[in-house]
Amino acid sequence: MNKPSHIVKSYEEQLKLLEETIIKMGTKAEEQLSMSIDAFAKKDLELARKIIAEDEVIDAYENSIEHQVVNLIALRQPMGIDLRETVTALKISSDLERIGDLSKNIAKKTMLINKNLSVNLINSFNLLGNKVKKQLKSVIDSYLERSKNFAKNVWESDEQADILTNQCMEDVIKYLKEDEQNLQNGAQLLFIAKNLERIGDHTTNIAEQVYFLVTGEYLEGDRPKNTESEML
């Protein structure tokens, strides 16, 4: 017996709302990351404070997604692709929430840096930050377009972010060796570099989830990593 059309429509609308909420959360996470990179590069403390204050917006999106997923599973009992949609949404929202937290952490560390940094050092962090930002945008696009190829490209580019992280670490070590008074700032810079690397890792997690959502299969093989980064 076919379900009444109004019930089917309501279910489809709920799934659509879930997708739209993920996109909004992803867009906000992109914005927070972009602002954190700008705040660091420009030593913009006002922007850093804005990032910290607006982190609650991402938390609210995550709570909304959790409620939507619970309602869909409890009331609709989805199967197959619809079940993948709901479970994937929950996992993606968790990674986006962590990206928001890490962007907030970058803003907090930026506020603790008490002197101007060299252009070369800032450029090194900008390269890493922009790479991670590009990955995040691409993976949100892959979810929106249900593109397994976009998702796989993000997954395969994780090693590039690790290489840029290593370069940042090396530049910070040089900075520390220049003057013992650079110790406090150097410690904050190390945290920022690792936070950016972790954002890249969470972005890659999302890529894996999108690939599974589209294909029903997991990406094969080990995630491309630069092993040197794990030693830092």
Image (cartoon, rainbow, N blue to C red):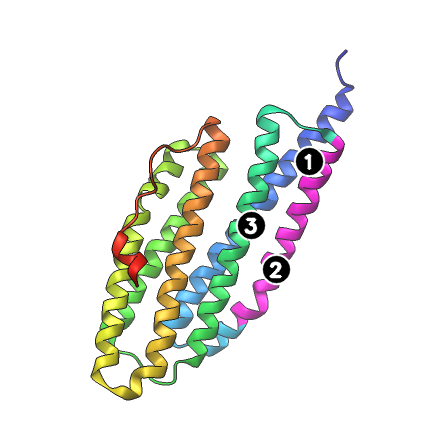
Would residue 95 be seen by someone viewing this image from the given angle?
yes
Q: CA distance from mark 2 to mark 1?
A: 21 Å
Q: Give, as a three-letter code, the residue at label 1.
A: Gln
Residue lying farthest to the top in this orientation: 1
Q: Which residue is mark 1?
A: 14
Decide: few, some or many residues near mark 1? Use Cα within 10 Å; few <14, some 14-19, many ≥20.
Answer: some
For label 3, the residue is 94
Q: Confirm or deny contact between disc 2 and disc 1 (CB under 8 A).
A: no
* 177 left or right, relative to 98: left
Residue 145 percent location from the top left of the image? 47, 35
Classify mark 2: helix, strand or loop: helix
Amino acid type for the residue under numbered disc 3: Ser
Q: Residue at x 51, y 56 (%)?
A: 98
**In which quadrant of the rendered view does residue 187 lie?**
bottom left
Where, quadrant-wise, is the C terminus in this rendering?
bottom left
Judged from this view, the residue extending furthest toward the bottom is 181
Region rendered in magenta: 50-75
> Please, is residue 184 above or below residue 84 in the view?
below
The spot of residue 231 in percent (x, y) is: 29, 60
- In this rendering, the answer to whether 37 lies above or below 159 is below
Q: Is residue 79 magenta?
A: no
Q: CA distance from mark 3 to mark 2?
A: 14 Å
Three-letter code for the amino acid on which mark 2 is drawn: Val
Please report contact status of discs 3 and 2: CB closer than 8 Å, yes or no. Answer: no
Q: Residues within 10 Å of mark 3 (few under 14, many from 20)?
A: some
Residue 212: image location, x then y, percent: 47, 32
Q: Secondary structure at mark 1?
A: helix
Of the 4 image quadrants, the one containing the N terminus is top right
Q: Secondary structure at mark 3?
A: helix
The residue wearing badge 2 is: 57
